[in-house]
Structures are given as structure tokens and as C-alpha cells.
Image: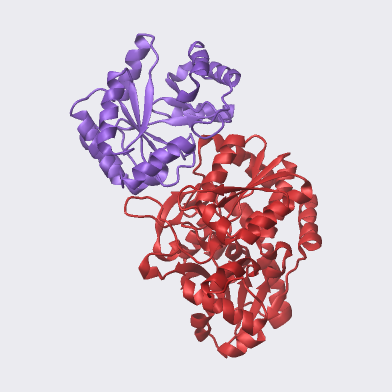
Chain colours: A red, B purple
Amino acid sequence: MSSKIKNLPDSKGFFGQYGGKFVPETLMYALEQLEETYIKLKDDKDFKSQFYSDLSEFVGRPSPLYFAERLTRHYGTGSIWLKREDLNHTGAHKINNTIGQILLAKHMGKKRIIAETGAGQHGVATATVAARLGLECHIYMGAEDVQRQSLNVYRIKLLGAQVHTVNSGSATLKDALNEALRDWVTNVDDTYYIIGSVTGPHPYPMIVRDFNSVVGEELIKQSQEHFKAMPDAIVACVGGGSNAMGVFYPFININQTRLIGVEAGGEGIESGEHAAPLNDGEPGVLHGALSYLMQDDKGQIKETKSVSAGLDYPGVGPEHSWLKDSGRAEYVAVSDKDALRAFHEVSEFEGIIPALETAHAFAHLDTLMKDFDTDSNIVVNVSGRGDKDINTVAEIDGIKF
Amino acid sequence: MNRLKHKLEKLNKKNKKALVAYLVAGDPDMESTLEIMHMFVESGVDIIEVGVPFTDPIAEGPIIQRAHDRAIKEKVSLEDIFELIIKFRSKDEETPIVLMGYLNSFIFHKNLIEKNQNNSVDSVLVVDIPGELNIADYGVKNENINTISLISPTTKNERVKSIANNSTGFIYYVTLRGVTGSSNLDVAEIKKILKKLKNMQKYQYSLVLELNLQKMQRYSQIALME
């Protein structure tokens, strides 16, 4: 079964029933062109060597697999290892994907780059690679996120990109995506849209997953080096799901490794105020793909709630929906409160301030570590660092600078 | 016979063009929508496109986005829209009605489309599916409702044919790259494509152009093109 799971999407962009290409006709040609370019380049020797050399020289890969000694002792069961994506240039896993996609853009001769961003990490990562190639760059960001991630907004501007504040709808990531799609429909001839997660129409979920799979590929090697076995479990937070997909994908056929995605539980699943479509949603179509989705009894997309801007999204990448239904991956949710507690704990135990998104994955260790004995090895994918969240957390803790 | 087909054939025989008008159901409320629909017909509209409000209308510009937002505040559902159209039909049995919206609304309310109470709705146009597919490909089946596909300035020749074959209503030509209400209309490009589509007349499909009211002057240029 699992090799079948790994060979997806099919030629039409479906993972089982999920995925597809649900876009206005104007974008069909652009998507076909992108798919063609990607299929042609992905196994090309020069393209690959350029991609891996950029990842090593510019991003600083491979990212370490680090033994979290005090956290391990705290739980007293299995060994906890951290895959340090927070140490990447720009501070999160997001740069892996943008390094790859900007090479596609360059190859396609596109002069203008656009992207959506939630927490701002993808915006920073996109502005960074665009600056490096001297390309015009526009970042769409919800008004609420502009406010709670003001540090990243300024970083994006420093990198020479333009930030467009989106006020429509819930003024968060979903609305930024709407606006970026509208830009793309309008400027499709000269514009490359760098989608920042494993969401959107085919071929994006596949492309973003593939570029970010460098994380899982490294982890296979590093697990051998560090503990001479495959991990018993990998834990990663899931918003759109690109950091999780990047670390899960190379492990899909490694059946002894449990794959666990942690969604944003907001005020708690039972409250309905959350951003956890895999835990409390149903299949529907948003932003070009069929996937689990938070919607109301009229088929309208629900507004979501999470302390973490990067997870505050009503949909999820279609491959996660497929991994959930097929049973290959498990998906849980963690509340804002628990994520904030983990944010503080990990900072104090390990000297690592994690992103609020990542803190969700850490918070789940409370439940998960009970499943394991001392011989086990558990990997947490540290998707990003928490510098960007300092203002949010300080405000919650009642601290004014 | 399907009202839409009938209407297009009738106009075609008289060598007349169809005037298609769009509104968003429930903007600002359902009573007004019903009134405006009758007013459309009295003012010479041949076909009415009823927009189905959606939280994330990715193909719309700011004006129609705001109309969607207002209708959503009114909590308008597709169920309410079917009721509205049944009411409209009590006075008007002739004017074809096309539902225009986003796929999620139609698959969520699959049963409503399949039932199509009193055959009130004639056609469905889904903005966010590729032209060569229609709602039947997503499990929403009703042979009495025809589906309308879109062709855009970026559609390649190879696909134009399969889209034309797939469209059972008319072919909807999106005249510009952009969201509804954009200003980058390229009259020369439209001329070229109209010619191309006319050469495919063996497909016997009617063609409807998307236009918006801000730029009447340029539309008169297009209308003169035949």
C-alpha cells in the first residue's frame, strides 16, 4: 500500500480523491507551463546541483539533528531529537521551497514574483530569494497578520519587496492567498506565484513537497548516524502542512516510523474556535484544491482562530488529507494554551526559542511520550525560530516594551 | 426544452445578440434581488446570471467581492437561492437563469442541483473548474441543467476545442486577464480570438463575452465587431 501512497499525485494532480486543479480558466495555461517546466527540470543534473548548492551555500544546509537532553530527561521515556530547521537562513524551513521555486521562475523567464504569507516567514523567504536574483517582488499579507508579525513585515521591506495589506474577509492567510491568486490572474504572463505551502492547485502541492523533502532526506541519513535506526516517530506542526510534508514524505515507505501532524487547536476543538480541519473539518474546495476544510452548514469557509499566524488557515494540503484517510499519518490538535506553555518550556529547557507554530508540535510531546520506552527515538521538526513571535507572547504575558 | 437553448436559438434566428446581466443573490437582501431580476427582464435583459455568494471569490474584483460579502452577511445559502428562483418563476417562466459561483457551494449542496425543484434553474457556471470539466465530473449530475465553460485569453488552441465540446450552454469568453472589473481589456486580442472561435462554428455554440459597465465606450468597439 505504501509505495502506492508515495507515487502520488496522479497525472491530474490527485492524491486519492484530494488535490486537483480548481482554478479559473485564465490560470490553466500557467499551471500547465509550470508543471511542464518542473517535470523537465526536476531530474536535470544542472538544476539539481544548482538547487543543492544554493541550499548548502546560501541556506546553510544540512540543518543539524540535535539531541534534546533536558527535554528527554523531563519526559523520562524516549530520546527526543530536534531537526533544526530554525537554524536555516531566514529562520524557518520556508526557504527550502523558495530556493527551488525561484530557480523555476528564473528558468521560465518570469520577471515578477508574488507570494502570500501568514506568519511572514514565507514572505521573508520569498523576498530573500527575489532580492538575490534582483526580481520585483510583491507579498500579500492579511491585515491582522501585518499587525501581529510586524517584525517580519519590516524584514520583507528591508529586502526590497512590497507588502500589500489585505483587509478582506478574516484578514489572515486565507485572504492573502485570495489576493495573491487575483494578482496572478491579472498578471499571469510575466508573474511567477511562489505558493508557500503544500496547498493550492496542482502542481504546487507536489513541487513544494519535493523541494522541502530535503528535510526528510537529511533526517534519514542523520538518524543512521546518530542512533543507527529510523525514528519511532516524527512530530511536526501542520497549517498548510509544508514542513510536515517535507519531513514525512521520504518516510512514507518506512513503516516503523509514526508520522504525527499537530494542528492548531485554538480555544479547543470542542469550542469550534480553532484551525484544525483534519481534526474537525470535511472535504471541500478552496484555493484550487479539494481537501479537508473548515466550513459552516452553508458551505462557506469558516474563520479560524490560532495564536500562531502560520497555522491560522481553514484548509490543509491535499496530501495530508490523503495520508489521514489512508491511515499512514496521524493528526492531532493542540490548544493555544498548551502551545504557549511549550513555547516557554522549550526555551527554558533547551535554550531554543521555537516559533509558535513549532511550539504546537512540542506541546504534543506531553501526550505522545507516554507511548514510548527509553529505547525509542522521537524527532520533532523544529520548523522555525520564535524571534518573530516575541511581541505576541510578550503581549499575552502582559509585558510592554 | 431548456430555456437557455431556446432563448439563444430564438435570438440567433433573428440575428440578434443576447444581453446577459449579472447580480449577486442576496445583495443587499433577497427581496431586492427578486425585484432587480424582474426589472432586468423589463429593461431588455435576455439571460440572468445569478451569483452564488462565497466567502472566497478568487476571480472577483473589489466591487463584486463586496457584493458577495454583503450577501454572506445576510446568510444567503444556495437553498435560499433556489427558493428565490422558484418565486421568480411564478411570474417569469421564460427568462433563462444561470447560477454562477464557486465549486464548493455546488458540491456542498449537490442534492439541490440534482433535484432542481420545478426545473427552475437552467444552467450552472462554475468559476473555479477547468474548462474541459463540469460539475458532473465532481459527482453533481443533472442532465436538464446545462453547464457553461469558460475560455480565457490564455487558453491554448488545443484546449479551446475540448472546452467547446464540453460546454452544453454557451461558451463564456473571459475578455481579460484579471478579476471582474479589471481595466486591462485588450480589444485587438479579443478581435483575434473572436475570429478564431467563429472559425469553429461547426460546434454551433453561442458565445457570451464578459464585459463590465465601467467601459462602455470600448464595448461599443467590440459590439461593432459582430
Please indicate, yes or no, whether residue A148 appears anywhere in the rendered image: yes
Which of the 4 image quarters holds residue B158? top right
Q: Determine the residue located farthest toward the top in the rendered image.
A: B14
Q: Is residue A24 above or below residue A144?
A: above
- Residue lying at 73% horizontally and 74% vertically, measured from the top left: A64
In the rendered view of the protein, which quadrant contains the C terminus of chain A?
bottom right
Q: Residue at x 25, y 40 (%)?
A: B115
Answer whether residue B200 is visible to the viewer in this image: no
Q: Using the image, determine if residue B131 lies above or below residue A240.
A: above
Identity of the residue drawn at 29% across and 39% down: B29
Closest to the observer: A189 or B112?
A: A189
Q: Position of residue A105 (x, y in %)?
A: 71, 44
Q: How many marks?
A: 0
Residue B147, image x, y percentages = 38, 32
Q: Is residue B200 above or below residue A286?
A: above
Outermost residue, front direction? A401
Residue A167: give x, y in percent of width and height: 50, 48
Q: Is residue B152 left or right of residue A215?
A: left
Extreme left residue here?
B90
Viewer-closest of A290 and B101? B101
Give the left or right position of residue B97, taking residue A303 as reference.
Answer: left
Q: Nearer the viewer, residue A45 or A321?
A: A321
